[in-house]
Image (tube, rainbow, N blue to C red):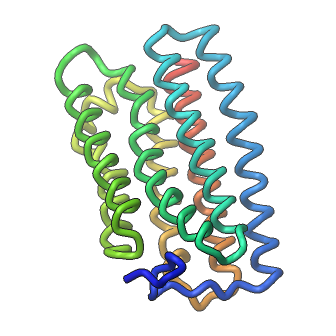
Amino acid sequence: MIDPEGRPLHLAWNYDRAEILADGIVHGIGIAFALGGGIALVTLAILWADGTQVAAVSVYAAGLLALLSVSAAYNLWPVSRTKWWLRRVDHALIFVLIAATYTPFVTRFPEGPTGYALLVGVWSVALVGAALKILLPGRLDRLSIALCLMLGASGSLAYDTVAASLPASTVILMVAGSIVYAAGVVFHLWEGLRFQNAVWHGFVLVASILFYSAVLDGVVLA
């Protein structure tokens, strides 16, 4: 349910100044990383990769920057109707980033139905999930978390193709990133912990760096 200000009725926003400052620092580091790293990644792709990979890497870099930027705006914005609209977009972009992260890796798959099926399936689920977060804010939040984790793990359905198409170091980075994301969910749900939001976003940042490294290692530099 949504109150007249657009806030989910179950949601409280009780972080103190120190917690907000810590979260702001984490987000600032994330945005700087996404902007600088994204430019570097696309530039290297233009120099060393083919056109399809450049496009795929650009989609990934744009998704990463969009999510971290909107997340910063949502978490640091004063409590208001605008904040709750930013919350919708923030949560929708989580789904988009998962799909955008898969996109560069699929360009390394051999020609055939596996890569296309995975990409279409991931983007379809991501767009449905994003639409639900926009249209039904504050509902089924725990189900959404489970759906995000399942979407992130869907690449395991094509593990043989992934392992055969990407360097072992890339697969290790992807698995490590997935583990860090999953571990961070514990803190995301631990609402009584002080600095819980900053800690959760710290896990997101570390996982994002691991996946960025995987894209760099397995797509751009491979």
In the image, taking residue 27 as reference, residue 180 lies left or right, namely left
In the image, taking residue 26 as reference, residue 66 lies left or right, namely left
User: What's the residue at 79%, 71% (across, down)?
Assistant: 22
Looking at the picture, does residue 151 appear above or below residue 135?
above
Q: Nearer the viewer, residue 211 or 69?
A: 69
Looking at the picture, does residue 181 appear above or below residue 36?
below
Q: Residue furthest front?
A: 4
Looking at the picture, does residue 54 appear above or below residue 183?
above
Q: Position of residue 218 (x, y in %)?
A: 50, 26
Quadrant holding the N terminus = bottom left
Q: Position of residue 139 (x, y in %)?
A: 34, 75
Q: Position of residue 68 (x, y in %)?
A: 63, 51
Looking at the picture, does residue 61 appear above or below residue 157?
above
User: What's the residue at 72%, 58% (across, down)?
Assistant: 27
Location of residue 196 by image quarter: bottom right
Q: Residue furthest left?
A: 113
Q: Position of residue 39 (x, y in %)?
A: 70, 27
In the image, taking residue 8 as reference, residue 15 lies left or right, namely right
User: What's the residue at 63%, 42% (across, down)?
Assistant: 65
Give the number of callouts. Answer: 0
Q: Nearer the viewer, residue 122 or 14?
A: 14
User: What's the residue at 34%, 54% (across, down)?
Assistant: 131
Q: Nearer the viewer, residue 67 or 50?
A: 67
Q: Residue furthest bottom?
A: 192
